[in-house]
Image (cartoon, rainbow, N blue to C red):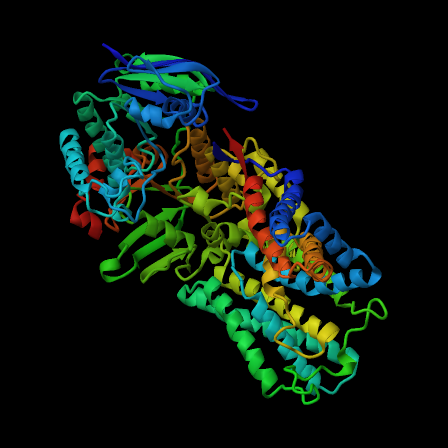
Amino acid sequence: MRLERRTHTPLYLAVLAPVVAILAALVLAAGLIAAAGVNPLTAYGEMLRGALGSKLSLTEMLTRATPLIFTGLAAAVAFRARLWNIGGEGQFFVGALATAWIGHTLVAPGWIGVPVLLVAGMVAGALLLAGPAYLRLRFGVDEVVTTLLLNFILILFVGLMIEGPMKDPLAFGWPQSVPVDGNFRLPDLVPRTRLHIGLLFAIGAAGLVWLLLARTVFGAETRAAGLNASAAAFAGISLPRTIMGVALISGALAGLAGSVEVMGVTAGVTTTMSPGFGYAGIVVAMLAALHPAGVVAAAVFIATVFVGADAMSRATGVPSFIADVIVALCLLTMIVALLFTTYRVRR
Amino acid sequence: MTKVLELQGITKRFGALTANDDVSLSLAQGEILALLGENGAGKTTLMNILFGHYAADEGTVHVFGQELPPGKPRAAIEAGVGMVHQHFTLSGNLTVLENVMLGSEPLSRLRSARQEARAKLMRIADRFGLPVDPDAKVGKMSVGERQRVEILKALYRDARVLILDEPTAVLARPEAQRLFETLRDMTREGLSLIFISHKLHEVMSASDRVAVLRGGQMVAERETSQTSAAELAELMVGRKVERPVRTDHEIGAPVLVASKVRVGSGAETRLDDVDFTVHAGEILGIVGVSGNGQAALGGLLSGLEHPSGGTLKLGGEDVGALGPRGMITAGAGRVPEDRHSEGAVGELSVWENAVLERLRTPAFSRRGFVRQRACKSYAAELIDRFDIRGASPETRTRLLSGGNMQKLILGRVLSNGPRFVLANQPTRGLDEGAIAAVHAELLAARSEGAAILLISEELEEAVALSDRIQAIVKGRLSQPISADEVDPQRLGLMMAGVWKEDDHAA
């Protein structure tokens, strides 16, 4: 048995790959659910019901999908250029912190404040990734290591800020930052739910990212540089400029995730506000095969798993950590599935 | 003579493509057989079937009278067949000895028998005249040495029939000659050899017998002494292919002038005070054994490297500090040495590669957005004008054959009407038909007045195309000699670095 490279990937395979990967991950996770003493079909049924079964659960799921779309786009943009940004989690938090800080102190009408806060989150995320990108370009430091480690530093930094200078005096000692001004909260998309217009921003961002990657000179140069750096350099494409540009966009998107989450949902920053949005963004991007439209679909799926797992846990007693297991399994099965989209098995 | 190897009626299909069609072939004891054919003629497939990498759809393989089970490389190895692949299968971080031993010991052994292995390796190296340091790291060796290790690896597994897939593809001419001398010696030790090639001159000089494959079929078998390069070329291509011939014409004004250009410094000097001038309508050939500074010269003229001393002028303007994009804007067209790693991005479509160098010009983008329709129609034009076969603007570039990919790169360069063209090893690895096409395009650009600098390791090519020739040796250039004065002996001396100092000083 050997693997043979396909001359091209048929469209049906590209679409089928994530579907098969997700099914495989669900089958594998079913083993664990069964081991916890629950019928997997019952558990998955509860999960679906918990995420999609009512208007409330559906809006809750879409609320959860919103930051995942941003972090998924952040990973997709970076990975396409072979910039391995594993730091989405840190960029999410730094974006959230910047937004909360400025949103608390700024005095302005909403129509000025909201864009300012969004930009603040983007700038913060972009700057956080610019550091590792610079280190890679200047000294060849592996950005996988630097961006990953920065996540832990940032979580500790958030802890420092919300226990210290940004501590909310009205939170009864609860570790939470000062909230953004009510003027700057994002309006609800569906009344009396947590779903806010950030979802539309996320979908709009996916459209813009698609436009950027597929239609602009920057997108074409990025793709060339990611696929074959030496040929791109020979053709006169500046690699440092491309990598830095990609880093700023990717970091900005992840920072925006934090910004929108603060303005739309939490108002203040806590260390527990992200159930791993940054890391899950990597899975979202992979399931989407790095395509912006796929990112939206994959984010909805991952959000379904997250939200559904909570409901399932309440109904069946299976720990909700199963959501993390499913998401992680999806990454592994998707990588295997991608192998089969580029190679075929020959006997 | 006894037959050590016999292939009978081998047929292999890949989907709709028949890679081998009822091919039969035999090899006699102590013989060197050349398997000649163009790229895609089915040579490598045939050898992979013999070695057991592929299972044939029909036909049998016999080695020393024993039939080999299909699709089992291990059985082929045990029967005494060794294969040296075109792309080496060595680990750079291991030593020669470790590489040779790799895979020959069962995993269940706790300690590897290094001492015995070393003794056996040295015995083989000595017997076949392949000197090697068993403790040298393979990663630090030249390609020629690595190839020797590959051959030793096969011999270590007691190969008595050796198959070499395009053994000279990565070697410079003298290294290739040395290889063939070694192979000849090895046959006296009882080895039988098949080598795959599409280069006529080496087939003529090194083989006893030639088998010619074309389109998956065995079209002819000849004793080498009974045939000629011309006959083989015709058999291989299926029609008469003639390389175009340069005709004399008026040479114009200087276009590219390098004076005392230096790249690198101290012990890292890669170009040492070189002078050359390329005139409009002229091809200047730079010949030399690979590794003598061609890479630095190519990098310099591509805009990837910059002079540390001296001046490089294009049309009177100093271009030494310009990068690739600056060079293109200044009117330089660049054909890189390696079309896969530098010339084109294989995973991108043909149209994207066609415009890659000039994406930012108004013809192909507006306000940062790519004008896809303009790009695609430009690519379609290139495909048409430069006869790029098997391609549409949307085709993945890596699916093109080497020759067609080179035509795409040439087309991208020449359609821009460059004043100066760098053609760095423009025909390396191409088959006869494609070589003729590339030569024709370069000569056409010359007629239109482009100044062309041709870097080549193929002497025939340099002599056929160039108006003047300079030799490059250890980063230094000889004085140019005009094409009329060229004789093989003088060129040989120049490439060995023997030229009159007053020649250099002039």
For the N terminus of chain B, the image quarter is top left
Q: Is residue A33 left or right of residue B249?
A: right
- Asked where in the image residue B484 lies, by quadrant, the reply is top left
Q: Residue at x 44, y 39 (%)?
A: B446
Q: Position of residue A68 (x, y in %)?
A: 67, 62
Q: Residue at x 25, y 26 (%)?
A: B159
The answer, for residue B363, to whether it is visible in the render is no
Frontmost residue, B353 versus A323: A323
Q: Position of residue A258 (x, y in %)?
A: 65, 71
Frontmost residue, B366 versus A309: A309
Q: Position of residue B293 (x, y in %)?
A: 29, 49
Q: Is residue A140 left or right of residue B204?
A: right
Q: Position of residue B227 (x, y in %)?
A: 30, 14
The answer, for residue A200, to whether it is visible in the render is yes
Frontmost residue, B9 versus B244: B9
Q: Residue at x 31, y 56 (%)?
A: B259
Looking at the image, which residue sits at the far right?
A: A191
Q: Is residue B348 left or right of residue B446?
A: right
Q: Vertical placement of A89 versus B485: above or below? A: below
Looking at the image, which residue sits at the far top?
A: B1
Q: Vertical placement of A291 versus A270: above or below? A: above
- Asked where in the image residue A63 lies, by quadrant, the reply is bottom right
Q: Vertical placement of A269 versus B137: above or below? A: below
